[in-house]
Image (cartoon, grey):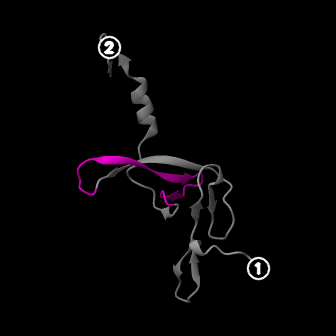
Amino acid sequence: MKEVLISNIRGEDEYGQPIFIDRIYGSGPTQRLIQKDATVYQGTLTKRRITVKRLTKEGSFNSHVWETADGRWFDRGGMPIEKPQQLVNEKDEEQQESTETPSIDGNTET
């Protein structure tokens, strides 16, 4: 008999059968994605940075989400989500960092 993770069940369908979801567990080297069919995902999990607006609407802060190599997205708690719209574009940041030049007084300017 196949073992079932109760925390991978997200409600019931119209027939009373459990609805299984993909979910990330663990952290660091023990991090793994348990898929809805109870198998362990063998692809890569990439940590992606997002910018989140504060509830007070005054400012924002950085957080992160996880992306699989096959295009699935998960929040910090390991739950499945849609692709976030507030992703930080790492290529733009790298390009901006590489265009900084030291000024005469030692400060950095772009």
Image quarter hosting the C terminus: top left
Q: Check contact, mark 1 vs mark 2: CB within 8 A.
A: no
Give the distance between the C-alpha atoms of the residues marked 1 and 2, in whole angstroms.
68 Å
Of 87 and 79, which appears nearest the observer?
A: 79
- Pinpoint residue 46: horizontal percent, then vertical percent: 56, 48
Image quarter hosting the N terminus: bottom right
Q: Is residue 110 magenta?
A: no
Give the residue at x 57% y 72%. Answer: 7
- In the rendered structure, the answer to whether residue 55 lies left or right of residue 31 reads left
Q: Amino acid at mark 2?
A: Ser
Give the residue at x 45% y 31%. Answer: 94
Magenta-drawn segment? 55-77
User: What mark, if any, has residue 103 been given in the picture?
Assistant: 2
- The mark that comes first in sequence, 1 or 2, is 1
User: What mark, if any, has residue 57 been given in the picture?
Assistant: none
Relative vertical location of residue 80 with respect to residue 103 in this rendering, above or below: below
- Pinpoint residue 6: horizontal percent, then vertical percent: 60, 75
Relative vertical location of residue 2 with respect to residue 92 in this rendering, above or below: below
Give the residue at x 41% y 34%. Answer: 93
In the rendered image, which quarter is residue 41 located in?
bottom right
Relative vertical location of residue 53 with respect to residue 21 in this rendering, above or below: above
Of 15 and 9, which appears nearest the observer?
A: 9
Within-10-Å neighbours for mark 2: few <14, some 14–19, many 20+: few
- In the rendered structure, the answer to whether residue 33 lies left or right of residue 67 reads right
Judging by the rendered image, the residue that carries numbered circle 1 is 1
Q: Amino acid at mark 1?
A: Met
